[in-house]
Image: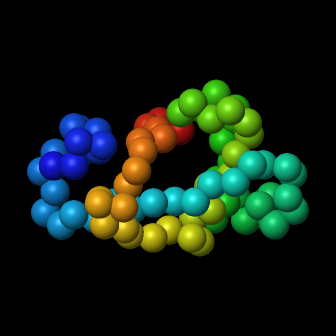
Amino acid sequence: MNKRLPSRLGKLRFPLVFVVSMTTDRGQEWAGNSPDLYMQFSAGVAGLKSPSIALLDQVRAIDVSRIVAYRGSLTSDI
């Protein structure tokens, strides 16, 4: 397994990881109009430095070899 990935991922069937792009929340109207598609997170959640938006319309799968750093993860209770 790639040493840059958290061990809790277990043994990967395919060497893919799903990635969700995020951006800083600056009160964008489009994010407020579609809260299920653009989830908002407060600063401090999962180590975020500022309020942020998950861009769920930009989900993609990438090969684990492209991962250069582990930035964090969200828990199911969010």
Quadrant location of residue 6?
A: top left
Task: State the count of labels.
Answer: 0
The percent coordinates of residue 4 (x first, y second) are 30, 43
x 85%, y 49%: residue: 26
Quadrant location of residue 28?
A: bottom right
27 displayed left or right of 14: right
Q: Residue 46, relative to residue 15: is it above or below?
A: above
Q: Residue 52, relative to residue 48: is it above or below?
A: below
Q: How is the image coloured?
A: rainbow
Asked whether the viewer can see residue 64, the reply is yes
x 62%, y 62%: residue: 55
52 displayed left or right of 58: right
Quadrant location of residue 34?
A: bottom right
76 displayed left or right of 23: left
Q: Residue 57, relative to residue 21: is it above or below?
A: below
x 37%, y 68%: residue: 62
Asked whether the viewer can see residue 74, the reply is no
The percent coordinates of residue 5 (x first, y second) are 29, 44
The percent coordinates of residue 32 (x first, y second) are 80, 58
x 57%, y 65%: residue: 56
30 displayed left or right of 68: right
